[in-house]
Image: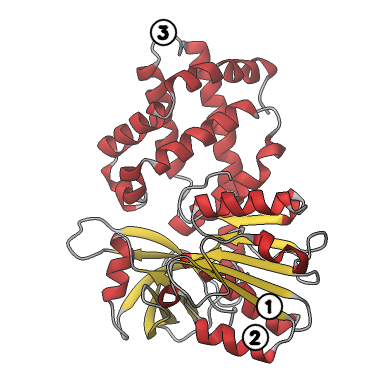
Amino acid sequence: MLSEKTIQIVKSTLPLLAQAGPQVTEYFYDRMFSYNPELKNIFNMTHQQSGSQQFALFNALAAYAANIDNLAVLKDALARINHKHTSYHILPEHYPIVGGHLIATLKELLPEQFTPEVEYAWREAYSLLADVCINEEMSLYQKTKKAPGGWFGTRTFTITEKRMESSQICSFTLTPADAKPVVAYLPGQYLGIKVTPANSDLTQVRQYSLSQQSNSCNYRISVKKEGLVSNYLHSLTEGDEVEIYPPAGDFVLREIDSPVVLISAGVGQTPMMAMLETLLSNQPNQPIHYLHACDSETQFAYKEYLFKQQQAHASLHCVTWFKDSKGGDFAGLMDVNHIAESLPISKGNFYLCGPIAFMAMIKEQLLGIGVASERIHYEVFGPHQSL
């Protein structure tokens, strides 16, 4: 436990963090990668270039300093971080490296304000946070390793099927090279894929949502061709192998015995497919609403599957919005007000996945029609941001 003095000192540095802004985390990452370039093989370097990772870390630091005396407030945020860390295979020995560069960054950027007393308080605070994360992440590792089909670290999988779902999204069925069972996952979770793209000196890890119901034989991910790693994956063929970390993620179905509304845009469809398959298998008579938005019909993935399921299940209601062409139920941007009367506003759970701006817009619409905020759940692809 931290002393009251330490808590107050850390909280007193909030104005300093606010004044320095994301420059703190930009400097931190530059420093860390300069001294420990091997960590470039763990961190997503694309997010480093875009600045999104620096912004996310700054917000996390500020939130921790503000709530250091009540970490329960950060329970959901920490759970999300812990799951993401396991998908990167973050280990206890990484924490002292990160902590050392964080303290050094604060000392170098704020030499006058970051006194020995403040440094001691921040070292204590970081040590507490590291212990909390290490304990939870080791627990997650052990739980997955001990489960049927589980493993620790990477495992080699073979691409046994590659299928285009739309003009941009390709599904990959991944079967373990050792032909042994795979560990089960919760609908909405993702895999960590470890690859070394062509013309790259770095190993890169990316997370891709699992897009089918859990089974003991294989996994399926569905990937939009847009970035360095996704382009590399699209270039692979059936028979090629990839290294995979076990499933992780805290964006999962909660109450499957109540009405569910799945809302996605673009490649945000992927976790929704795993959720939908699971719901149809386990609660086929429970009302399910699936709302999806994309630019055009050619970008609408899983179209045939959804049509067949809607024909087979009277409980499934699919509604689409296509921005640039006809073919959907509605044209333009998604507006849930069009179908508000048919939605389970008071009893349903609403799951969102897609671009940040899209989810923020939909959350505002849902709140506007009376959906309680605690019934709205969402997943961000990349560094987390609040809606």
Percent across and percent down for residue 41 are 31, 52
The kind of secondary structure element at disc 1 is strand
**Distance (Cα) linking label 3 and label 1:** 61 Å
Name which residue lies at 65% across and 29% down. 67
Instruction: Tell me the amino acid under the disc marked 1.
Output: His
Between 85 and 339, the one lying in front of the other is 339
Give the residue at the far top of this rendering.
112
Counting residues from the start of the chain, the first of labels 3 and 2 encountered is: 3
Residue behind mark 2: 310
Is 350 left, or right, of 239 in this rendering?
Answer: right
For residue 313, what is the image quadrant? bottom right
Name which residue lies at 69% across and 84% down. 281
The kind of secondary structure element at disc 3 is loop
Instruction: Tell me the amino acid under the disc marked 3.
Output: Glu
Percent across and percent down for residue 48 are 34, 44
Q: Judge whether residue 150 can be spotted in this image.
A: yes
User: How many C-alpha atoms fall within 10 Å of the one at disc 3: few (<14), some, or many (≥20)?
Assistant: few
Percent across and percent down for residue 354 are 51, 59
User: How many C-alpha atoms fall within 10 Å of the one at disc 1: few (<14), some, or many (≥20)?
Assistant: some
Residue behind mark 1: 317
Task: Return the mark for residue 3.
Answer: none
Instruction: Tell me the amino acid under the disc marked 2.
Output: Gln
Up-down relation of residue 280 to residue 112 (above or below): below
Percent across and percent down for residue 346 are 82, 59
Residue behind mark 3: 112
Q: In which quarter of the image is the C terminus?
A: top right
Counting residues from the start of the chain, the first of labels 2 and 1 encountered is: 2
**Distance (Cα) linking label 2 and label 1:** 7 Å
For residue 204, what is the image quadrant? bottom left
Tell me how many marks there are: 3
Single out the mark in the foreground, 3 or 2.
2
Counting residues from the start of the chain, the first of labels 3 and 1 encountered is: 3
